[in-house]
Image: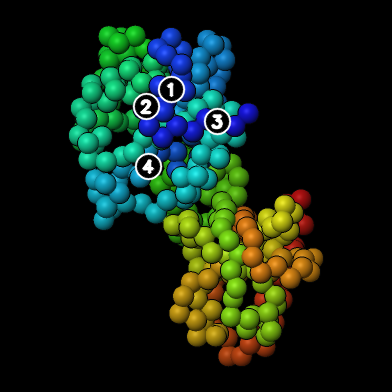
Amino acid sequence: MPSVILRSVDEWRAYSHGPNRRTAVTIGNFDGVHLGHRQILSKLCDRARLEDLTSAVLTFHPHPARVLRPAEAPELLETLEQRLVSIAALGIDAVLVAHFDAALANLSPEEFADRYLVNALHARVVLIGDNFRFGHKQAGDANLLIELGRRRGFEVENVPRVTIDGTVVSSSAIRNALRSGKVEDARHMLGRPFSLAGDIKSGTGQGRLLVVPTLNLATEQELLPKIGVYATEALVGGKLYRAATNIGVRPTFDGAHTSIESHLFDFHEDVRSGRLEVRFWKRLRDERRFSTPAELREQVLRDIETAKEYFSTVG
């Protein structure tokens, strides 16, 4: 059953049918919904089932850094809607999306806990990560939340970080991996391939005519993997195809804008619109300029074979 998405405290109160329904809550931005997030959300669902509570996520939009430090705000891995779909898929009952603005940012830790955890969500248990901070200028930490819970009637459970080969799984670490083209590292931390999703858009037609046919993706996601060629999968029309994808500016054709072009294996349909999702498995090479379209085509055909060989090894 999909999660209920609420966009304000008033909507939450209407949904919760009064003050008696208690919740198990976690709080955060959950960009990417990676393995660390999934561990917290899994434990949240377990506690909620065990104690007959509503499992609830409190998240924020826009990202707090967009309001507090816009010049330093990270490029997000997913749109809000993508995050909500991922959270819902893990069995969470309800998500409260709080609009993050200056008024919310100025709440003291005590005011934040009272407004959201006590008066709105009626929290019975709150699950947090190791580095949890809250309230004005992030003045609140886990110890303060534990003390507030003792006084206001909720329990706090600290969920340890997830590490892979000594690296802490985090949205920042995944962003760094993608900027470096290390999509396999990103996949390990996400627990699935990083994907870009959006609408199919019309290209210039040069690639189809002179190289190989491709589907061109227009996405609202902010962070793209490093420019280059990748072994990917493409989901279109409800079917999954293996593919080779180029992210770049098409230098052989003097391109000026970044494009995302995927050649799908064993795909013969003439599709000009609709939804497309591209999942990144392995980086094959840098993008580079070729002297002629024929040279580019030869390299693209080699890339396709390299991608097929890669997929034959991963099953």
Q: Is residue 214 above or below residue 42?
A: below
Left or right: 168 in relation to 146: right
Asked if residue 87 lies left or right of residue 172, the reply is: right
Callout 3 crowding tier (Cα within 10 Å): few <14, some 14–19, many ≥20: some
- For the residue pair 300 and 33, the one nearer the viewer reads as 33
- Of marks 2 and 3, which one's residue comes earlier in the chain? 3
Pointers 1 and 2 in contact (C-beta within 8 Å) = yes
The three-letter amino acid code for the residue at tag 4 is: His
Q: What's the residue at 20%, 27% (across, down)?
A: 108
Mark 2 is on which residue type?
Asp
Image location (x, y in percent) of residue 152: 30, 11
Q: Mark 1 — residue?
A: 14
Residue matched to label 3:
3
Discs 4, 3 touching: Cβ within 8 Å? no
Q: Is residue 109 in view?
A: yes
Name which of mark 2 and mark 4 comes first in the sequence.
2
In front: label 4 or label 1: 1
How much space separates mark 4 and mark 3, taking CA atoms? 17 Å
Q: Are marks 4 and 1 in contact (CB under 8 Å)?
A: no
Which image quadrant is residue 215 in?
bottom right
Instruction: Give x and y (percent) for residue 178.
Output: 49, 56
Tag 2 secondary structure: helix
Q: Residues within 10 Å of mark 1 (few under 14, many from 20)?
A: few
